[in-house]
Amino acid sequence: MKILPDFSAAVKRGLQNILMAIVLLALLFLGMRLWPHPPLSQGVPLSSVYYDRQGVLMRITLANDDRYRLWTPLEQISPLAVRGILLHEDRWFYYNPGFNPVSLVRGFWRSYVAGGKMQGGSTITMQLARMHWHLNTRTPSGKLMQIVRAVQLELSYSKRDILEAYLNYAPYGRNIESIGAASLIYFAKAPQDLTLPEALTLSVLPQSPSYRIDPKTGVLGSALTQARNRLFQRWQEIYATDSSQQALFQLPFALRQPEQMPYIAPHFIEQLRQQNQQLVQRNTRIDTTLDAGLQRLIEKQVSAFIARNQSRGIHNASVLLVDSRDMGVRVLVGSADYYNPEIQGQVNGTNAKRSPGSTLKPFIYALGMEQGVLHPMTILKDVPSSFGAYAPENFDRRFLGPVTATDALNFSRNIPAVYVASQLRQPTFYQFLRLSGVANMASENHYGLSLVLGGGEITSQELAKLYALLANRGVLRPLRMQKSDVSPQPVRLLSEEASFITLDMLRQHRRPGDTLAQRSSSLPVYWKTGTSWGFRDAWSVGVFGPYVLVVWEGNFDGKGNNVFVGADAAAPLFFNIIDSVMASYPALQEPKYLRPKQLKRVDICLASGNLPTPWCQQKGKTWFIPGKSPIKVDTVYRPVVLDNQSGEVACPPYNETQTHTEVFEFWPSDLANVFAQAGLPKRAPPVNRCKDNGVAVNGNPPRITSPLKNTTYTLRQSQQGRDKIAFNAVTDADSKTVYWFVDDIYLGSSASKTAIDWHPINNGQYRIRAVDERGRADSRMITIELVN
């Protein structure tokens, strides 16, 4: 009678133990699920996909393990593809614990007992475990480990996470893994946009991806076609389909192969990858500022130009196009042919340091206007000159005499540019370039005034920023290569007025006559050319519409060629590009910029660029910045009262019946000399011998041009002799002789058009004076440092 209660108690204890075990097991499972686990995407090498500014695919790169792989969230994958995968791979995915016992027994029987073809019976979770942990599942022990790992996945992650990871791990033929990479490469679309035939094709690929696609043509093999069609028949048993879907499966089908993928702007993308290695590892989609249409258009122009000019020794070029409105790089052609090793085609020429020639001169004149040295019509002297020990020459070894600042810039005259640069202070030209971000510059003393003529080095990208600074009215902003780039606070380096005037000066630069198109442009072009020493680099740089265009021609190995002249070599390609862009984009317009409010137009005397007098023969207008632009009265045209009988200068008081007034041109001696050498001698004004209280009347004093004011000269001493300094001065038309003094000690005299040499013997400060025969004088202080 006591047996039944004992049995009942035992059963009760057993049930309690089972219930406790179930509760503990449930708590264990819950703990494993709630315990933080790294995402299944962690550590998976991913490709990067680059798109242009309008979403055009430019390139997909290989991941670090040489696979094409993208991670796509499950929500961004077409439901057609998800259903197809589940139908083909694992219909019981949402119900099994990570393995399917029936499938495993069936696979074991066929593989090891019946002696048939190896069959695994793996679920989606088991396949993910194999790929995630790189398991060898061809042996029974390996298969057992796969099951254990699959259960681990099921305990640690949700079904959603497992399915998403599988779709992003699965192989799809060749070296393509993940449905995102397969969809993009094979069908040129995102996985959320797959059609039913495309979705079912990708559904059957992971089982045997290696032999079901022709790697050369991309045409589906018979095995792949049959597998897809069998899956479609099963699909129709579950999901409703119409005749249009059935017809799609009868059409020829081919998959685009990786070799056929776009490879646009390789230099641009390589630079992005180098600059953003960390960013590339985190993000698979890179939206850039490039315009693929413009890129192809300009690449064609470069290729055609190189083909036409190879006989002249022009084999390479680089082009950069930047939109000044957002500073986005729209086109980057690093070389004429990326795949040509003979020209080092894989070098990015837009990021290479090269001598800029005269392309930096506009900024010298802009600084000059900013600092009150000149205005656009200021007359500058293109005459033989020395600036201390530096005596520059013009490219054509000729001198034009008096030229306006505008003509000096557009004719690329060296002497006026060096003179303007020598007058700059705070900032100097060197300091301005440093402020603008030109990198890797040596010290200012290293360059001296040679920096004006291309003595330094700059990249096309740095040059583009400088010209964009003019387009943006003096505001410096960095280049952008990605849409996500956040520009720092812009920096103003020039005033609106100086930037506006500089562009207006460049607009007057006439385009060359040997470009392909000769039609007049509907948009103004503000441009400049440059040629480096030794004919190693030919440049043409400018602004048109919203764009800054930089064209470089040369050889990456630095080999010179006499045809590498900016105006003759680079300018034709520059304008061919502009004409082709404007023809392809006829609605292109210049950004709307208002004229600076402070800017004025004033009358000037054209001969001197100064304010006109009643005797000025020709008048014109110029831009004028109040408070900055130099304001002087013209002294070239002067009235002279002559005696009617002798023709000599009459002395006051004047007798109106015996005198008359004539206007003469009073040119400084250096300009008068240039006129004479050009065969255009000016009529010499008569000598004024009149005295007014012992002082000669009228005329300008000498102006010392060498040595420079407040300058330190470091000279070398040797046994053979000492370095010398040339003294030179510009004199008025009525002056013939200049007398030179060093600290009031007479050094000697020189004709007004020649120099005199001084050999200092001691260190120290010296006061240099130049006095002409009429007693007019100029002086300045210099410092001498003698070294052995």
Image (cartoon, helix red, strand yellow):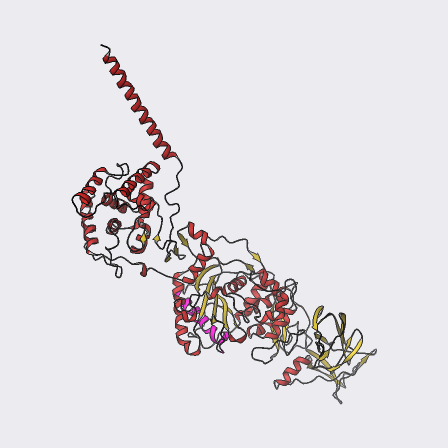
Towards the viewer: 205 or 375: 205
Point 39% across, 35% down: residue: 35
Q: Residue at x 46, y 70 (%)?
A: 574
Residue 543 placement (x, y as % from top left): 49, 66
- Is the C terminus in the top left, top right, bottom left or bottom right quadrant? bottom right
Q: Tell me residue 372's x, y (percent).
A: 65, 66
Number of marks present in the image shown: 0
Residue at 27%, 38% (x, y): give it.
94
- Quarter of the rendering containing residue 656: bottom right
Does the magenta segment cover residue 199? no
Q: Main secondary structure of the magenta part?
A: helix
Residue 770, position in %: x, y? 75, 76
Image position of 650 (left or right of 337) = right
Residue that protrudes farthest toward the top in the picture: 1
The range drawn in magenta is 559-584
**Where, quadrant-wise, is the N terminus in this rendering?**
top left
Residue 764 pos. (x, y %): 76, 69
Residue closest to the far right: 693
